[in-house]
Structures are given as C-alpha cells and as structure tokens.
Image (tube, helix red, strand yellow):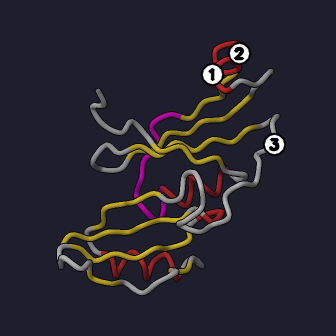
Amino acid sequence: MISGVRHTGIVVNDIENAIEFWTKLFNFEVVTDKIEEGKFIDNLLGLSDVSVRTVKLSAQDGSIIELLRFTNHRSLPVWDGYPYTTGLTHVALNSIDLHSIVLKLEQNGYSKINEIQKSPDGKVLVCYVKGFEGTLLELVETI
C-alpha cells in the first residue's frame, strides 16, 4: 500500500544553478545536501564506486524535489524534453498566482510551451514551462 509520494528525483548537470532555480524562483528550501558513496548506494543503483551529491528541497506543503549530481558517472541523455517522452516527463507544481510565476520565469529566461489555459472542468488554470536544464514543469492554479 502506498501512503504518498516521497519525492521527485531529477538528475542535473549543474547542481548549483539547479538549487538556485528551485530556491529563488519557487521558494523551495534546502533540507539536506550531502554526498552519497559506499556499498549501499552502489547496490541501490547497480553501479560501482558511485559518488552522487543529493540535495533535497522542500516546498511549503512538504513536497520534496531531490536533485542528484553524479560526480563520477556520466548522466545518460534519454529525456528529450517533451511530455510524451518515455520515463519521467514532468513535475507538477501547485501555484497560488500562476500568472506571476510564469512572468517571473520568463523574466529569468525560461519559456512556457503553451499559453495559460483553463481546464475543461473549469477548476484549474494550467500551463507547461521548460525549466532548468529542460525539466518540464506543469504549473497548476486552483480557481
């Protein structure tokens, strides 16, 4: 039985700028920042001699984004930036003021891939934005 989502993990190439993206633009707070190495992480990932920096960031509601930067294993380019890609496609974030967040993102060089629109049931406003290193964000505001 699943009791909830623990976190969403995102492998990044530039962890310092990724931290800045999530903390400055979305007000996430760094909860942990550590290097993971040793037999446990090697076995968990099925690799040898892993060294990975993991940074967990928390939103106001306790939701967690985990950023991972592998220091001695190359990240494989599978993600192609589209919502129909196999695998992790996007992170959906609840918003209080969607228009302000989208404007702030655009002012910082990030672009939306569609206009803000109302869902067919009329309950939310929603749009997709390409975030840091191409991570696709679904931004949702309950009306």
Distance from label 2 to label 3 (Cα)?
Answer: 18 Å
Three-letter residue code for mark 2: Gly
Q: Residue at x 52, y 82 (%)?
A: 107
Question: Is the residue 11 above or below the residue 49 in the image?
Answer: below
Query: Disc number at residue 38?
Result: 2
Between discs 1 and 2, the one toward the N terminus = 2
Tell me which corner region of the image, top left, top right, bottom left or bottom right, holds residue 53: top right
Query: Disc number at residue 74?
Result: 3
Q: Bin the neighbour count of mark 1 within 10 Å (Cα to Cα): few under 14, some 14-19, many 20 and up.
A: few
Distance from label 1 to label 3 (Cα)?
Answer: 17 Å
Q: Secondary structure at mark 1?
A: helix
Between discs 2 and 3, the one toward the N terminus = 2
Query: Disc number at residue 65?
Result: none
Tell me whether circle 1 and circle 2 mark residues in contact (CB < 8 Å): no
Q: Residue at x 18, y 79 (%)?
A: 122
Distance from label 1 to label 2 (Cα)?
Answer: 10 Å
Question: Is the residue 26 above or below the residue 37 in the image?
Answer: below
Tell me which corner region of the image, top left, top right, bottom left or bottom right, holds residue 133: bottom right
Q: Nearer the viewer, residue 1 or 50?
A: 1
Q: Bin the neighbour count of mark 2 within 10 Å (Cα to Cα): few under 14, some 14-19, many 20 and up.
A: few
**Magenta stretch holds residue 26:** yes
* Residue 45 located left or right of residue 67: right
Residue range in magenta is 23-32
Q: Position of residue 68 (x, y in %)?
A: 63, 41
Q: Nearer the viewer, residue 33 or 64?
A: 64
